[in-house]
Amino acid sequence: MNIKISLLITTLAGLTTTLGIIPCFFKIKKQDNLIANILAFASGIMITISIISLIPEATNLLNEKYKPFPALIICTIFIVLGILLSTLIDNKTEKYKKDNLYKLGIMATIALMLHNIPEGITTFITSSLNQELGYKLAIAITLHNIPEGLSIAIPIYYSTKSKLKAFTYTFISGFSETFGAIIAYIFLKNIITPLLLSIILALTAGIMIDISIYELLPTSFKYKKNKVAFMYFVLGIILMFFIELAI
């Protein structure tokens, strides 16, 4: 097991999230269009990740210990708890209500951090056991981390006009994959179990679904009620569908 290489692969894959700040360095005349389209795009991404990746993986992990029906019930319970947790976070960030974009950026960061921790665990373990497979997984993760970074950077930047804050939040989200790798290395035998991973994945799915349906998409349509934003929503779904197939 080459710990250094595995940790490096996981870290580099995670930090590609920071590439989401690239549009912040360009002067864009129609900012409302960009914000609306990126939010709709991010909504499609999060819904797709939840439905075709997080929920099935959580269910499969639960099937290792429970029969299919109880596994499905447990998964559903934690998805609902994730939605309730997202609602709680939304209420706690009520002071940012006047700056809805900033609130969205914070919630996206939290949701993607929870998503990236088990992803970091998976990448680290995979690359430790099979370095070539680890490289392939890292490439696939890189491809979907960039649009994830956009979903954080654009709301943060256009609400604060600070490239540093946009970078910081995307960095925190991306570095959580390294945190997952560290957890896997230090505590794997003691606390990382299929049950715990399934709970994290189901909770994250619930949070992402809630943010996508009740925050990102409605906010996008508030900026621009047009077909283009909806097309970006569909594009996010299609893109993540093919990326998830490649993982």
Image (tube, grey):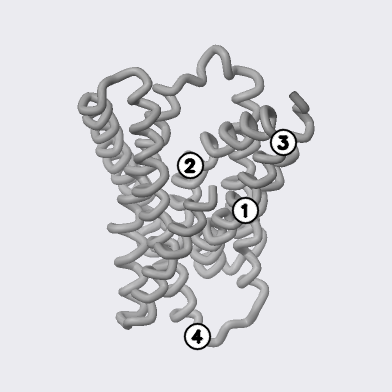
Tell me how far mark 1 sits from mark 2, CA to CA.
14 Å
Q: Which residue is mark 1?
A: 142
Label 4: how many residues lie within 10 Å, few (<14), some (14-19) or many (20+)?
few
Mark 3 touches mark 1? (CB < 8 Å): no
User: What amino acid is found at the position of numbered circle 3 in the picture?
Assistant: Gln
Give the residue at the far top of this rendering: 190
| Front position among marks 1 and 4 | 1
Residue 115's label in the rendered image is 2
- Locate residue 156, reporting x and y percent: 53, 61
Q: Is residue 209 above or below residue 100?
A: above
Q: Which residue is mark 4?
A: 30
Tell me how far mark 1 sits from mark 4, CA to CA.
28 Å
- Locate residue 48, reporting x and y percent: 38, 55
User: What amino acid is found at the position of numbered circle 4 in the picture?
Assistant: Lys
- Locate residue 169, reporting x and y percent: 58, 52
Q: Which residue is mark 3?
A: 131
Q: Residue at x 59, y 59 (%)?
A: 146
Tell me how far mark 4 sits from mark 2, CA to CA.
32 Å
Query: Circle 2 sits in a helix, a strand or a loop, which is it?
Result: helix
Tell me how far mark 4 sits from mark 3, CA to CA.
44 Å
